[in-house]
Each structure stands twice: as structure tokens, then as C-alpha cells.
Amino acid sequence: MSMSFEAFMRNSVQPMRDELTRLGIEELTTPEQVEEALSNQEGTALIVVNSVCGCAAGQCRPGVAKAPQNDVKPDRLYTVFAGQDKEATAKAREYFAPYPPSSPSIALMKDGQLVHFIQRHQVEDRSAEMIAADLIGAFNEYCK
């Protein structure tokens, strides 16, 4: 019995999902979950738009993994997976205006408003340590 392409893709990206969820980052897989998590929320939330690309593996996820070790961090941590949970990702991106869709990317929200955003082009040419430092700076500024 052969595995469907969809099942194959789901199985092949599961380790990429697990890399964030094992850190306590909650996965949002439906537009409704995104809406509930992000609309009119008090406090701070980090939203990682995960993807299968090399810069997500080499820089984005490792940088995100280091940042919450900071004393000051967001109240809530979320992730959506571009290319897999398309509707949830599209819903999350509505909150990131005026930035164009970008995968991977990282958003920091405060009281329902976008206050810091790291686009793909800001991930590609930077190390995981630089991304973590960028996030920690934003956490220290907005999450106190």
C-alpha cells in the first residue's frame, strides 16, 4: 500500500514542526485557531511562519529556539506552517500588514498590534545567533 503524496509531505515536515512545538510553541493549524489566538489579545505573542526552506532550518528555527531563553519573553508563542496549513498561514499574514507574505518570518504582536517583524530576506543572510539577538532586543523592548 503506497502512501499518498499528502501523507508523505505531512510525515516529511513533521520533524520541522516538532522543532518548534517541543519548545512549547503552540501550532495553529486552522484560520479559526489563528483568529482566536491573535484577535484583540492583550499582552504579547510571537508568531513564527515556519517553512521547509533551508533558511528556516539553518537560521530561523534555531534562532527562535534561543530567543525564549531570555528572561523577558512574549506571553504566548505560536507557529503556522506555510505550504502545509495554507488557510491558517493566510489568516496569520492578515495580521502582518503592510508586510508582504514571507516564509519563514517572525512576528511579535503586542495588544493585538504588530510591533516587530522579521522577513525572509532578514533571515537568509543572518545567523541563528543574530536572529535570536534581534528577537531578544524586541522582547526586551515590547514584552516588559
Image (tube, rainbow, N blue to C red):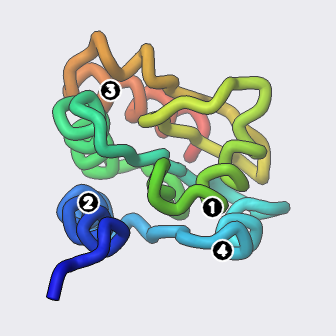
Residue type, numbered disc 1: Ala
Residue tagged 4: 33
Other residues around mark 1 within 10 Å, as few (<14) / some (14–19) / many (≥20): many
Q: Between disc 3 and disc 1, whose residue precedes?
A: 1
Residue type, numbered disc 2: Val
Check residue 24 in the rendering and tell me which mark sits there, or answer none. Answer: none
Q: CA distance from mark 1 to mark 4?
A: 8 Å
Whether label 1 touches label 2, CB < 8 Å: no
Residue 45 picture quarter: bottom right
Name the residue: 53% across, 50% down.
47
On the rendered structure, is 107 left or right of 34? left
Other residues around mark 2 within 10 Å, as few (<14) / some (14–19) / many (≥20): some
Q: Is residue 79 visible?
A: no
Q: Residue 55 in the image: state x and y as whole percent.
A: 26, 28
Q: Tag 1's secondary structure?
A: helix
Q: Tag 4's secondary structure?
A: helix
Q: Residue 59 in the image: state x and y as whole percent.
A: 23, 30
Name the residue: 78% across, 25% down.
98
Whether label 1 touches label 4, CB < 8 Å: yes
Q: CA distance from mark 3 to mark 1?
A: 24 Å
The N terminus is located in which quarter?
A: bottom left
Q: CA distance from mark 2 to mark 3?
A: 22 Å
Q: CA distance from mark 4 to mark 2?
A: 20 Å
The extreme bottom residue here reads 1
Q: CA distance from mark 1 to mark 2?
A: 16 Å
Residue tagged 1: 88
Residue tagged 3: 131
Q: Is 108 situated above or below 134?
A: below
Name the residue: 47% across, 35% down.
103
